[in-house]
Image (cartoon, grey):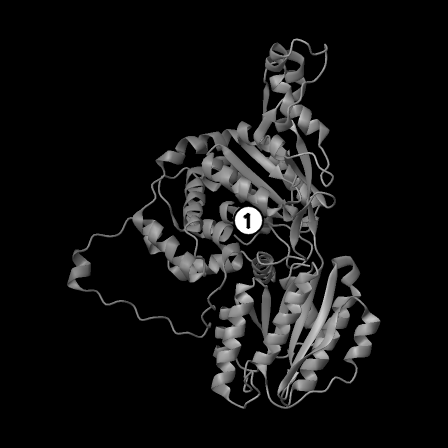
């Protein structure tokens, strides 16, 4: 289906036909008239809005404090999840991991629950939480749609009701399951939910057009709507000048075989992959993959480590605790906890004044906060060899670019360089752009590659920063051809062993790292070193300072 607006209307129709099978919609679009037009059509679902900062009490239900205090007996109110139906998650790109996990668990447990996630991602590295991407069947990207390309649309509920009635009559053959699973594997999708959601979309489309069997149109449309955006690798299209294969020669066995009546069997896998390729606007797959990399690194470290505090930071739900000078009592939560027991306590305390609230130590609820520490990004730069000056210049430029935004992102930056037989902390952790420029001026390069020494100094710098309350992150720029051991000897084998041991030490300390391969060709030893370090590896053989800064910012989710 080449018309993007027609794809949007079909996706909304399929979601209305089988919300339980498709589980929901990931709608990627900035606020505007096009998205408003789609949201107008979604009114037919009678959706209820959900905000990323919603509390557990509103989500799961909880104690109705006013009714409990008024009657003296415990009253509860229902949460949004308990009512089922379709929820709309606004600003879904800001959904915290904890809420994403709760919603994912609810989608797995409740067949009457669906979710429409409004993702307003503005730059690479942002996006919907992986737990929700995995479970929402449909994906639409409206950013490339102009208002002139759209038109008025309303869900035809009468026809949708008839399609729902036919849904259970649609037969999904074993061949269709096998083919969809094979196409998902060819697209680099390793989730089994994706083929199941694809078959659900194909079945909904077959029911919509009044059929009881899947055909090529059903499968191609389902692949475009469900599988395309999940692809991690799209096979190259065959060249146009490829000669057509020779027609098969009839044989006696073929003549005796009855004709295949299953239309899905006649579809080549290439046609389904072409459908997935055609459904992806230019650049969308790269943005989605950049978001996956960023979230993978964010799983190790976001901009600074998160720690719990009793005095400052973002508020968390109050917890039971003791009265002390460090904590702050949450009065409302304490009264909420004590309210259901007032009637019983008053029977055991007849001497209490009328209207007096009887509290017990177990009722005390203390406020907790989530504070975020400063992050220090430690550049570990290979300054050896003929390309040393270029790598150092790139690293210096990236440091200066990142320091320009350091105040807003709460970042410190440090530089460890290694060359000859030594590794040095060339720039201690700082947020000062002036100090960094002064210390980085004239930094020399050339000589051997003491990779292990560089990792050792980087580890010491990271542990020192962690001791001062900062969250360290390593960015190693090297071609991975270390040849100087820790004892200063020119022994390539010993240098490799030392580097692996230090990489394992870094991994055991839980220090997140990113390895940037600056070599012209991929180095398998560097890939092995990255695995020992638990780091993400990126190949950037010709990166300039701006590209390096942008890559690091995207990878670390800034």
Residue situated in front as seen by the camera: 534 or 109: 534
Rendered residue at 48%/79% (across/down): 497
Residue 22 is situated, as x and y percent measured from the top left of the image, at 48, 41
Left-right relation of 293 to 549: left
Nearest the viewer among 557 and 172 is 557
- In the rendered image, the residue lying farthest to the front is 351
Identify whether 340 is placed above or below 400. above
Counting from the top left corner in percent of width and height, residue 381 is at: 65, 78
Query: Residue at image x 73%, y 36%?
Result: 328
Badge count: 1
Vertical order, 431 against 257 (above or below): below
Residue 54 seen by the camera = no
Q: Is residue 182 left or right of residue 464?
A: left
**Vertical placement of 542 versus 78: above or below?**
below
Residue to which mark 1 is pinned: 139
Where is residue 385 shown, x and y percent of the image? Answer: 62, 89
Secondary structure at numbered mark 1: strand
> Which residue: 72% across, 58% down?
374
Answer with the quarter of the image where residue 470 lies. bottom right
The residue most toward the right is 434
| Percent x, y of residue 165 | 41, 30
Answer whether residue 469 is visible to the viewer in this image. yes
Front-most of residues 358 and 265: 358
Q: Quadrant of the C terminus?
A: bottom right
Label 1 neighbourhood size at 10 Å, few (<14), some (14-19), many (20+)? many
């Amino acid at each position: 289906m080449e018309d993007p607006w027609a794809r949007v209307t079909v996706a909304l129709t399929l979601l209305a036909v089988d919300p339980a099978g498709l589980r929901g919609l990931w709608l990627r679009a900035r606020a505007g008239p096009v998205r408003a037009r789609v949201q107008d059509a979604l009114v037919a679902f009678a959706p209820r809005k959900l905000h990323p900062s919603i509390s557990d009490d509103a989500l799961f239900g909880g104690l109705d404090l006013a009714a409990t205090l008024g009657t003296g007996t415990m009253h509860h109110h229902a949460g949004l999840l308990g009512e089922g139906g379709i929820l709309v998650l606004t600003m879904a790109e800001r959904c915290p991991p904890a809420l994403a996990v709760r919603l994912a668990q609810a989608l797995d447990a409740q067949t009457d629950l669906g979710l429409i996630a409004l993702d307003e991602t503005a730059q690479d590295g942002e996006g919907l939480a992986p737990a929700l991407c995995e479970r929402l069947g449909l994906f639409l990207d409206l950013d490339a749609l102009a208002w002139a390309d759209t038109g008025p649309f309303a869900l035809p509920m009468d026809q949708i009701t008839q399609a729902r009635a036919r849904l259970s009559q649609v037969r999904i053959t074993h061949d269709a399951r096998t083919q969809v699973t094979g196409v998902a594997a060819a697209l680099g999708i390793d989730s089994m939910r994706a083929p199941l959601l694809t078959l659900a979309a194909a079945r909904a489309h077959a029911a919509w057009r009044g059929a009881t069997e899947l055909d090529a149109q059903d499968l191609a449309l389902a692949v475009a709507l469900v599988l395309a955006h999940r692809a991690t690798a799209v096979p190259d299209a065959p060249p146009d000048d490829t000669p057509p294969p020779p027609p098969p020669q009839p044989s006696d066995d073929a003549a005796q075989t009855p004709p295949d009546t299953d239309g899905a069997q006649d579809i080549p896998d290439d046609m389904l992959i072409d459908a997935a390729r055609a459904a992806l606007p230019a650049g969308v797959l790269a943005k989605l993959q950049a978001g996956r990399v960023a979230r993978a690194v964010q799983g190790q470290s976001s901009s600074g480590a998160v720690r719990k505090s009793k005095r400052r930071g973002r508020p968390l739900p109050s917890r039971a605790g003791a009265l002390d000078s460090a904590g702050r009592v949450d009065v409302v939560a304490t009264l909420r906890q004590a309210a259901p027991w007032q009637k019983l306590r008053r029977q055991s305390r007849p001497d209490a004044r009328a209207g007096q609230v009887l509290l017990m130590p177990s009722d005390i609820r203390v406020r907790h906060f989530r504070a975020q520490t400063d992050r220090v990004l430690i550049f570990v730069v290979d300054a050896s060899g003929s390309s040393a000056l270029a790598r150092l210049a790139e690293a210096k430029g990236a440091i200066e670019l990142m320091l320009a935004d350091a105040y807003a992102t709460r970042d410190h930056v440090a530089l460890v360089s290694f060359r000859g037989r030594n590794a040095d902390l060339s720039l201690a952790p700082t947020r000062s752009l002036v100090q960094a420029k002064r210390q980085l001026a004239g930094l020399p390069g050339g000589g051997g590659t003491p990779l292990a020494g560089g990792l050792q100094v980087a580890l010491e710098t990271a542990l020192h920063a962690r001791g001062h309350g900062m969250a360290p992150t390593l960015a190693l720029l090297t071609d991975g051809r270390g040849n100087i051991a820790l004892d200063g000897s020119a022994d390539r084998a010993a240098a490799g062993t030392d580097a692996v041991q230090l990489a394992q030490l870094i991994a055991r300390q839980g220090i997140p790292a990113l390895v940037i391969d600056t070599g012209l060709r991929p180095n398998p030893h560097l890939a092995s070193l990255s695995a020992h370090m638990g780091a993400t590896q990126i190949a950037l053989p010709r990166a300039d300072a701006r590209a390096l800064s942008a890559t690091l910012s995207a990878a670390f989710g800034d």
